[in-house]
Amino acid sequence: MEQLNKVENTSKNIQEMVDEILGDSLKELDDYIALVRKIFIESPEIIDGDLDKILLSIPTYTYYVLEIAQRLEMRKGVSKEHASFAKNEAMLNATGTVADKTAKAENQTAEDRLVQIAYNTASALVKSKLDGAMAILDSAKKVQARKLAEMRLTGQAGSAVGF
């Protein structure tokens, strides 16, 4: 039970770091995806205006989130290097056998490793949100293709879509 509490407390600390790292940088994408979800769930048939907006908006939101992802990847690399440097420095300053030095260095640099885990987690979260947004975009494209095929079959396409 004590180990579970330690894991929970450490996880909460990491989650707080992730929240601080990301701030509200994903809020616009999250809010828009929630709106799209509502449209998909509540509407038996998606109207063309909503579909067009989805097809144009998701790439716009993901463009900015990709920039966030790139910056996170850089910071993730820096946190990895910082943790490695701190461990090496601690090992150089430690005394005893190699095993003793390693143990001391790992204890002294635990916080650095937690920061590294936080950046890895933040980066993975951004990537998963981007993947989800792209999956929704792909779904919207399929709906659009189906609607166009139906319009062609019924002869409703007309000049509005270039036929």
Image: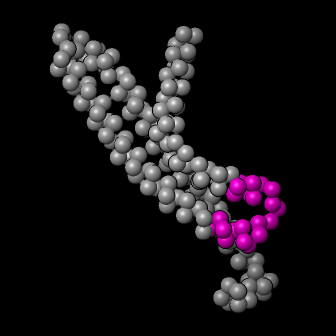
Q: Which residues are magenta?
A: 35-55
- In the image, residue 38 sits, relative to residue 8, either above or below, namely below
Q: Position of residue 135 (x, y in %)?
A: 59, 57
Q: Quadrant of the C terminus?
A: bottom right
**Picture layout, residue 95 above or below residue 86:** above
Q: Magenta stretch containing residue 38, yes or no? A: yes
Instruction: Identify the residue shown where x is 28% and y is 36%.
Output: 81
- Rendered location of residue 21, percent (x, y): 46, 39
Residue drawn at (33%, 41%), measured in percent from left and top?
A: 77
- Specify the principal SS of the magenta part: helix
Does the image show residue 5? yes
Tell me which residue sits at (21%, 20%) in the image: 91
The reply, left or right, for residue 75 in relation to residue 29 is left
Image location (x, y in percent) of residue 48: 73, 72
Quick check: 17 left or right of 78? right
- Taking the image as shown, residue 2 lies to the left or right of residue 54, namely left
Q: Residue at x 36, y 43 (%)?
A: 75
**Is residue 72 inside the magenta stretch?**
no
Quadrant the N terminus occupies: top right
